[in-house]
Amino acid sequence: MHYWKVARRSPPTTSSTYLIDPWRRLAYWNKPANKDDAGFEVVYNQAMSRTSPWEAKRIVLRGRTTEVIHLVPDASWDLCYVDADHTLRRITIDLIRVWSKVRPAGFLGGDDFCTSIWQHRERFEPTLVYPFAVHFAEAMDAPIIALPHNQFLIQKVDGFAFVDELDP
């Protein structure tokens, strides 16, 4: 049985939710989801429509992390979920840049935590979320957990540990 260290505090109230995405074609990004700008405009409009009931709490920052992260106050997020460019360069930049935005005892999670770097076939750039996220958590002295469906979660507390919920 695995135990996950969770700092005790009162349940968070959602005062705001940030949506950060370029919603545009990125010239340097060799991944299957990199569509043309018209396709991204459809995705953007769908995201705005689907989150419209929470419009008063929604903060939309349209741009890459490096372009907009300065607009987010430090230690303001209880949870940050990264599902972005999975190349080594971009996952490094994204995790390092968002870490200061997560509150102490908060969580940084993400997608595409795959042990194989060839998630999208060899004609696309390798997916390096898995190795970098583990090394990042160790460098930050924070525990990381591997979750089902290729997800990961790092808690901003002291004490590096790698917990693999998929390995009984």
Image: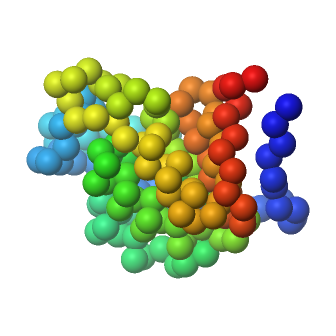
Residue furthest to the left in view is 27
Above-or-below relation of 135 to 44: below
- Picture residue at 31% right of the left edge, 54% below the top: 90
131 to the left or right of 68: right
Q: Position of residue 98 (x, y in %)?
A: 48, 65
- Picture residue at 35% right of the left edge, 61% below the top: 93
Quarter of the image that includes the N terminus: top right
Above-or-below relation of 81 to 18: above
- Picture residue at 20% right of the left edge, 30% below the top: 124
Quarter of the image that includes the C terminus: top right
Q: Position of residue 95 (x, y in %)?
A: 45, 59
| Residue nearest the observer in this picture, 43 or 123 | 123
| Residue nearest the observer in this picture, 73 or 112 | 112
Query: Can I make out residue 55 in this image?
Result: no
56 to the left or right of 94: right
**Residue 41: quarter of image:** top left
